Amino acid sequence: MSNGGDSGAVLGAARQHHLAQVNGVIRRPGMYGRDEMAERLLLEAMAAVDASLERWWAECERLREREAFAPTGVVGAYSNILPANALRDATASIYGEIAHRLGWLELDRALSEAEFHQVSTDVGGWLTQDRALSEVIETFGPPSLWIGGTNPFYPKTLGYTTADPDHDLICFHLWNTVANTSPEATLRGVHPEPVVLAVRHRPGTFPHSFSFTPEGLRRRPTGDQRSPVRSTVWLFHGEHARNASGVFDTLDAGLAWAAQHHVTGVLAEYAIGGAYDVAVNEGRFTPSKAHHGTADHVAAFGPGLRHLHLTGGRRD
């Protein structure tokens, strides 16, 4: 029969084993399966070993309260935000954040308070243009947590935080995929390296915690038009017209109407609400001059979303 000292050694070994498993599934989630069940099982096992089950259950409830857990899990919440092939790594970042709060995440680099504040302050305005992986590292340094592999043709998520468990992760969601090429062609990506689509950095509910790059807005799932993040419509402006002459709830509907009438002009996507307010809230525009936000500026503000030039009802 084991004595107390032996029991302590066994418990310590079990804790180290579970810590390694938790950090493994968070960094390379794809190796543990196609969905987040591996994260949930391993983190709950870690909580049991660490006598922290009540804290783990509270974190699970908090996910639902923040709207970060849909009927299909965290991956369901992210499916309104990112392309399908970027969901696995992004989903793991939520569980990585929980692991950090519970003291289980082993950081590759802990930011100082000043560095964390700088990332928090700068990231919204930094995303108003498209950004690549190398720019993330150059601007903000190596991440605290790298989720996904190093292959430049595939998505990944980079997290930044301090050693303080009260600090959430600022998560950069990057995307790439293999381009369609002929069988004899050299394998290449749609982009030379992964590009940033969105950063999860805002407080509050999950759907409103993101800022997007222009590429991130272009790559958002079609169903996002009816998601709680942002509703949009498509307006057609004739080439020489002063006012819009058509409003459509989807891009396909607008294109069908334009083809039917052989019209020439611009079919543009508009967010429901004020274009200026939505752009500021999403981090696509940061007021920086005295006239920004004035009546004239707001009245003339463009949507900054997708648009297509049409000639005779067909895309240029």
Image (cartoon, grey):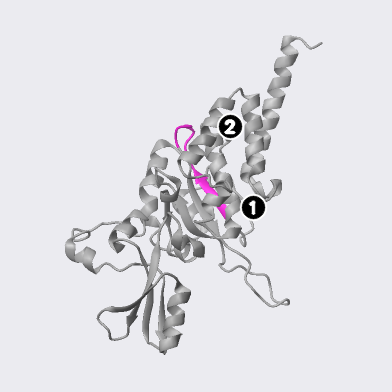
Instruction: Name the residue: 66% across, 31% down.
Output: 45
Which of 235/16 is in front? 235
Q: Is residue 51 above or below residue 196?
A: above
Q: Is residue 312 above or below residue 303?
A: below
* In front: label 1 or label 2: 2
What residue is shown with label 2? 104
Residue 165 magenta-highlighted: yes
Tell me the kind of residue under disc 2.
Trp
Q: Name the spot of residue 21 as percent of width and height, x first.
A: 68, 36
Tell me the kind of residue under disc 1.
Gly
Query: Of helix, strand and loop, which one carries label 2?
Result: loop
Which of 112/274 is in front? 274
User: Dot 2: few (<14), some (14–19), or many (≥20) neighbours within 10 Å?
Assistant: many
Instruction: Name the residue: 48% across, 75% down.
Output: 252
Which of 118/285 is in front? 285
Q: Name the spot of residue 179 as percent of width and height, x first.
A: 62, 71
Q: Is residue 85 left or right of residue 4?
A: left
Q: Is residue 52 above or below residue 232?
A: above
Quadrant that contains the N terminus: top right
- The span picked out in magenta is 156-167
Q: Is residue 29 left or right of residue 136?
A: right
Residue 289 magenta-highlighted: no
Query: Of helix, strand and loop, which one carries label 1?
Result: loop
Q: Name the spot of residue 47 as percent of width and height, x first.
A: 61, 28
**Can you tell which quarter of the image residue 250 is in?**
bottom left
What residue is shown with label 1? 149
Can see residue 40?
A: yes
State the separation of the CA atoms marked 1 and 2: 21 Å
